[in-house]
Amino acid sequence: MIKKIVEKLHLDPPKTLVLGFALIIFLGALLLTLPIATVDGLGLNWLDALFTATSATCVTGLVVVDTGTTFTTFGQLVILSLIQIGGLGFMTFATFFALIMRKKISLRERLILQESLNQISIEGVVRLAKMILVFTALTEFIGGVLLSIRFAFDFPLSKAIYFGFFHAISNFNNAGFDLMGEFASLTAYVADPLVNLVVCLMIILGGIGFIVVSELYDYRHNRRLSLHTKVVLTTTGLLITAGTVLIFILEYNNPKTLQPLSMMGKVLGSFYQSVTPRTAGSNTLNIGDMYQSSLFLIIILMFIGASPGSTGGGIKTTTFATLIGAVVAQIKGKEDVIFFRQRILPHMVYKSLTLTMIALFLVLVMTMVLSITETTARFEMVLFEVTSAFATTGLSMGLTPNLTPIGKALIVMTMFAGRLGPLTIAFALAQRKQKEYFRYPKGKITIG
């Protein structure tokens, strides 16, 4: 269906992605309005259905109604399907079905796939798509089995298996939807080692990017890692470690979060809350009970987000690392940004700065507008919600279910822009530039 529309309209890859995601969201919202989708037999109203479908397709996790108690099994499976398609990209699935039917992948389809996977060239994109599908299926299966075993101690076996695989798929795709009811997420398992470690590992694997996963798999053969993989792994490790330590220190004496827990519970709770802002969205501590200092730290982690070519959002770890590298180089009086004895080209620094400024502008504008529409909400709640929506994280201080209709529409637009905006901008910036045949004379301005 999408392919026929694209061919008729002669759309380029970025516009194809936007149209494709929009159509999937529309169809998902339509299904969620059906009486069979909700427990009360009435279906969701159109705005709430659109919000839920957008949140699922954009793998965000913000919800205006509780997933576990509002939706029937049919409605939950619709949401789960949207999460899977949105996390991996509809072009990855289209490639999968084309390969099954032994159809040739056209140049146009390879270009769209390149855009969807955030690749610089079309070389190897079909092979990467195959690897993504296999790795995803294997990871979600293993995670689902482990979580099912743990949940079997708390629920009947059939329910435990269903819950296990739902939460495995949701968290691997960095969506954060849960079935625990009453917007509780995984707070009942804050001190459970198995649930914490399995879910966190799935979030990390889904967030570091499929390029990195592919290189790690091939490392046993070639013993080489690209600069991209080294930067992603280093930045991810530093952010998770720093986040865990800081949350542990800041929340240690908070009677509503870490204080009542054992030392193991405190460490696991801090670790989980450091991992989940990487755009996952599930939580084991009540976000609304955390101190403001911790919430501000989580906002920063959400804004940075996951890594390129992953199921997560945000400005991405490589963008953040490049900007930090540029600052360090400037302070040291060096012209080049150096990572692992390799020089980052100047246009990559400009690209990182551009993406960051556009993202920051979007968050600030949406925060200002929502501050006008949501008059009863505190400023930090609004900023937290907007950042969570842009970074497709899904963490919430409790504002989402109480949003006004205008507020819901604004968050829908923010989630959509957060999922597709930076990706499309990155593609546009990567296009071949027109040659300039003259340069303007140098000018000087005072900085600082």
Image (cartoon, rainbow, N blue to C red):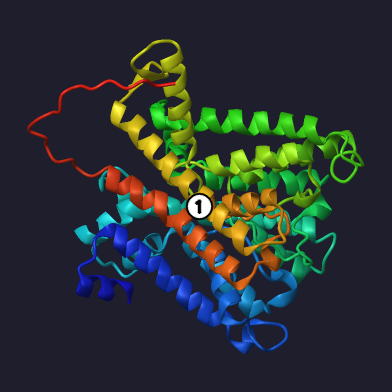
Q: Which residue is disc 1 drawn over?
A: 365
Please name the residue shown 75% across and 63% down the image.
183
The quadrant in which residue 7 appears is bottom left
Instruction: Judge left or right: residue 274 versus residue 279.
Output: right
Residue that extends furthest to the top in the rendered view of this protein: 333
Q: In this view, does 276 lie above or below 15?
A: above
Q: Type of residue at label 1? A: Val
The quadrant in which residue 212 appears is top left
Please name the residue shown 56% across and 53% down the image.
368
x, y (%) of residue 370? 59, 59
Residue 220 visible, this angle: no
x, y (%) of residue 256? 88, 46
Please name the residue shown 61% across and 82% down the image.
45
x, y (%) of residue 258? 85, 40
**Quadrant in which the C terminus appears:** top left
Q: In this view, does 121 lie above or below 28?
A: above
x, y (%) of residue 386? 58, 54
Instruction: Judge left or right: residue 175 versus residue 8.
Output: right
Residue 39 visible, this angle: yes
Instruction: Judge left or right: residue 13 versus residue 396.
Output: left
